Image: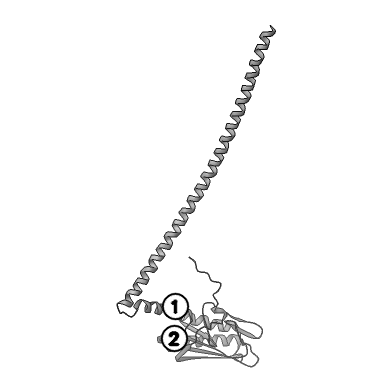
């Protein structure tokens, strides 16, 4: 009996050891499998990111290529004009367009027929910025294409404001007790028949509001008006904060 019992024990021990070994092997295989799966997932994600980056770079490269083609064609056009003896017509056209933009932006002096309005404060009266603004607004509504106040070019960013003693125009201070002259280039055909009479009516309404003794207002038709360019050191000329939209 003892011999049989001793014979069975090694068999049970062998089975136990085998089961433990199999379990360890299965656990090890499962761990390796999970690691492989995780690595595969990371690899798949990195691959997808890389693929997206490549697609984005290809898109940007296509845009740059289109711009380069456009510039290349433009350069060829300029070279062709110069080689054919046309005198660089395309270049001259660019210069002309740039000059037109500069005129429109107020960066060039201009002249033509127009009107002038002289506002002279009487003794003890200080000019109000609202009076100047009203005439400027009326002139804009009448079709003025260029305007100046005390030879300060009126542009889109021009400010007209008052403090205690001064009227500020394009960052330049003028005494509120001094005369102000507004000049404008307006449609010539309407100057004498409509624009001057209309501005005189506006002047009469202002006198009625503030009093005849406060300010003298003189409206004149001018055969030639020169509107100076905006000075580069003026606050209205500043553009360093402006970034182009690509």
Give the total number of marks visible in the rendering. 2
Name the image quarter holding residue 176.
bottom right
Q: Is residue 179 left or right of residue 69?
A: right
- Where residue 237 appears, as percent x and y from the top left, is 54, 79
Q: Is residue 87 left or right of residue 177?
A: left
Image point (62%, 23%), residue name? 19
Name the image quarter holding residue 216.
bottom right
- Where residue 127 appears, as percent x and y from the top left, is 61, 87
Relative to 160, residue 21 above or below: above
Quadrant into which the N terminus falls: top right
Q: Is residue 137 left or right of residue 77?
A: right
Distance of mark 2 from mark 1, alpha carbons? 29 Å
Q: Residue furthest left?
A: 84
Q: Marks 2 and 1: which is nearer the front? A: 1
Mark 2 crowd level (few <14, some 14–19, many ≥20, 10 Å Cα):
few
Residue indicated by mark 2: 194
Q: Would you say residue 144 is visible in this rendering? A: no
Q: Residue furthest top?
A: 1
Residue indicated by mark 1: 101
- Where residue 232 appears, as percent x and y from the top left, is 54, 82
Q: Would you say residue 70 is visible in this rendering? A: yes
- Where residue 41 appears, as percent x and y from the top left, is 54, 42
Image point (64%, 93%), residue name? 123
Q: In the image shown, does 108 or 81 lie closer to the viewer? A: 81
Relative to 137, residue 41 above or below: above
**Helix, strand or loop for disc 2:** helix
Q: Residue furthest bottom?
A: 123
Mark 1 crowd level (few <14, some 14–19, many ≥20, 10 Å Cα):
few
**Helix, strand or loop for disc 1:** helix
Q: In the image shown, does 222 or 39 lie closer to the viewer? A: 39
């Amino acid at each position: 009996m003892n011999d049989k019992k001793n014979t069975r024990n090694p068999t049970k021990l062998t089975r136990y050891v085998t089961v433990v070994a199999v379990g360890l092997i299965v656990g090890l295989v499962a761990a390796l499998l999970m690691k492989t799966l995780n690595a595969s997932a990371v690899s798949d994600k990195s691959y997808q990111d890389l693929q997206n980056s490549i697609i984005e770079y290809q898109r940007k490269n296509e845009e740059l290529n289109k711009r380069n083609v456009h510039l290349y064609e433009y350069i060829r056009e300029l070279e062709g004009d110069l080689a054919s003896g046309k005198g660089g017509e395309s270049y001259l056209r660019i210069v002309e367009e740039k000059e037109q933009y500069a005129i429109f932006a107020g960066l060039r002096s201009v002249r033509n027929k127009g009107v002038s309005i002289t506002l002279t404060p009487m003794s003890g009266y200080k000019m109000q910025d609202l009076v100047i603004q009203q005439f400027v607004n009326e002139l804009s509504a009448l079709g003025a294409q260029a305007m100046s106040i005390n030879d300060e070019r009126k542009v889109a960013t021009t400010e007209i404001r008052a403090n205690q003693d001064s009227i500020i125009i394009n960052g330049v201070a003028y005494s509120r007790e001094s005369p102000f002259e507004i000049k404008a280039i307006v449609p010539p055909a309407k100057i004498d028949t409509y624009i001057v009479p209309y501005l005189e009516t506006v002047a009469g309404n202002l006198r009625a509001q503030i009093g005849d003794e406060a300010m003298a207002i003189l409206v004149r038709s001018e055969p030639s008006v020169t509107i100076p360019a905006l000075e580069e050191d003026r606050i209205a000329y500043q553009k360093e904060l402006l970034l182009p939209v690509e």
